[in-house]
Image: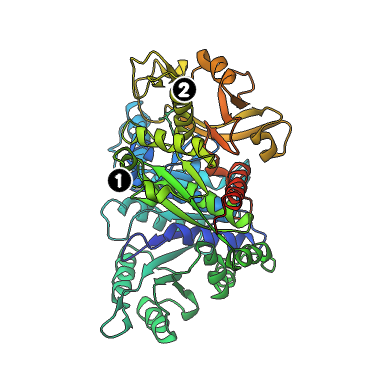
Amino acid sequence: MPKYIFCTGGVVSSVGKGVTAAAIGRILKARGLKVTLQKMDPYINVDPGTMSPYQHGEVYVTADGAETDLDLGHYERFVDIELTRASNFTTGQVYAEVISKERSGDYLGATIQMIPHITNEIKRRIVRASHVNGEDADIVIVEVGGTVGDIESLPFLEAIRQMRRDVGRENALYIHVTFLPYIAATGELKTKPTQHSVRELRGLGIQPRVIIARSDHPVTKEVSEKIALFSDVETRGVIPLVTTPHLYEVPLRLEEAGLGDYLAEALSLNVQAPDLSEWHDLLERIRSPKPKIRIAIVGKYTSLHDSYLSVRESIYHAAVANQHDVDVEWIYSGDLEKGKGWERLEGVAGVVVPGGFGYRGIEGKILAAQWARENQVPYLGLCLGMQVMCIEYARHVLGWDDANSTEFDNATQHPVIDLMPEQKELSDKGGTMRLGHYACQLVPDSHAHTAYQVGGLIYERHRHRWELNNQFREAFEEAGMCFSGLSPNGMLVEIAEIEDHPFMLGSQFHPEFQSRPNKAHPLFSAFIQAAVEHNKQTGQP
Ligand code: GLN
């Protein structure tokens, strides 16, 4: 029988509720438990796939092809698990399901209401997430999106309140993640917003067992005791979580604060002593002094770093694995088009062009690819970044000035990137791309093959409609491009590389979704190795 931990947020958003939930997953996994996680999002979109990254940050893609909230990325990275589409749902999905059942007559005679119909559907989805590969998880950590007090999240809070009745009081508990503002004038941390937020939660029938008090300043014992007193939580249940220099420290901080033992006791979990040795080793590598490299991310949504969250983390994992610290230079590709920002490219050890949609900023990405190719600077293209690399090659090496993707120019004589045939008939935008993991066969004697160090198939996650146009494959190959990864039937180009270059590689898939803090992704790792080598050769510090 799975046990449930429900995480709510209080006071303000953006204090790292997702990271906290993920870190709790890690410390429980370290006790030998089978952990899974789920995020419930209160917005009405069916999924974040159609939302602007400025609204939502990155869209994280699961192996089974769901477009999900970026918190799933934190869950997978911290707990080192593979989640499925059951791990994320939205109000939109809940309503769509209930309304479709109503239309097909499933509830004939009934008035369809928030309680019980909507709340039952929410609970059904929570229970569904507890079954992982035909087995029950020991622990399901369910994060409620938004902040307590939002109108939109009320049905979720009501559903998790009911869940505790349904599964038994000893099998569920609530963790409230709040924030303590700091008043500089008096040098104090304030607990009042936390008190109010807990009161609001209790008004909805939810008594938290644990309060995680996020703060940018040290939290004294008096402050913890005050929160405990006003919230009717044991002092042991108040866990201060001061902003850490490194994201990956959070599990260790929670463990040191006694949260793992407290949860084990509160839920009567049958656990072994925690083994966080792997995580300690990781932190040692992260903290040790290392030389630094600079990597540019050239993209469209660079003003919101969360848009490229997994890309940034993957670069970081690979740098740590290669004993380096890394500074990311965020460059808006639209600036390059206007002749701006070029000085920030000077001296970078490598360039990453991440995924994206739409024409804005494309020409700047093409310029960045040209710059990396001509200056022999390592380049890693992710999805759109691969397409851009091929367009650049077609224009400047093959000499087809008008080469383009039909996403940006339908009339080009050289549509080197074109819609996949199965995409041509589709009119719906939501959930209709080529999504999730597909196999890829690596070609020997290539950077890709050397990086992965495997002979057979690899599996990587996808999210795209366009692909390299096979009509031009031969011309590209004759001009020095190598297609080093292909779909098993040979029909789709999955990886492209440039032969006359130390490392210029693009993948049609998104390797960033499979990188882990202690298992850097092979392609990112090979890219960072090449970047380090580039620095050596060019005499950069
Ligand atoms: N817009 C491109 C396509 O749909 C690339 C997508 C992406 O980078 N994820 O093929």
Nearest-to-viewer mark from 2 and 1: 2
Residue 193: horizontal and vertical position, in percent? 29, 72
Amino acid at the residue labelled 1: Met
Along the line of sight, the residue nearer the viewer: 256 or 237: 256
Residue 425: horizontal and vertical position, in percent? 39, 15
Give the SS element for disc 2. Answer: helix
Give the CA distance from mark 2 to mark 1: 56 Å
Q: Quadrant of the C terminus?
A: bottom right
User: Which comes before the other along the chain, label 2 or label 1?
Assistant: 1
Splitting the image into 4 quarters, where does residue 446 fall? top right
Amino acid at the residue labelled 2: Ala
Residue 467: horizontal and vertical position, in percent? 48, 23
Residue 260: horizontal and vertical position, in percent? 58, 69
Quickly name the residue at label 2: 394
Whether ligand 1 has any atom under 8 Å from the Cβ at mark 1 is answered as: no
Q: Residue at x 35, y 79 (%)?
A: 230
Give the SS element for disc 1. Answer: helix
Determine crowd level at label 1: few under 14, some 14-19, many 20+ residues with C-alpha closer than 10 A. few
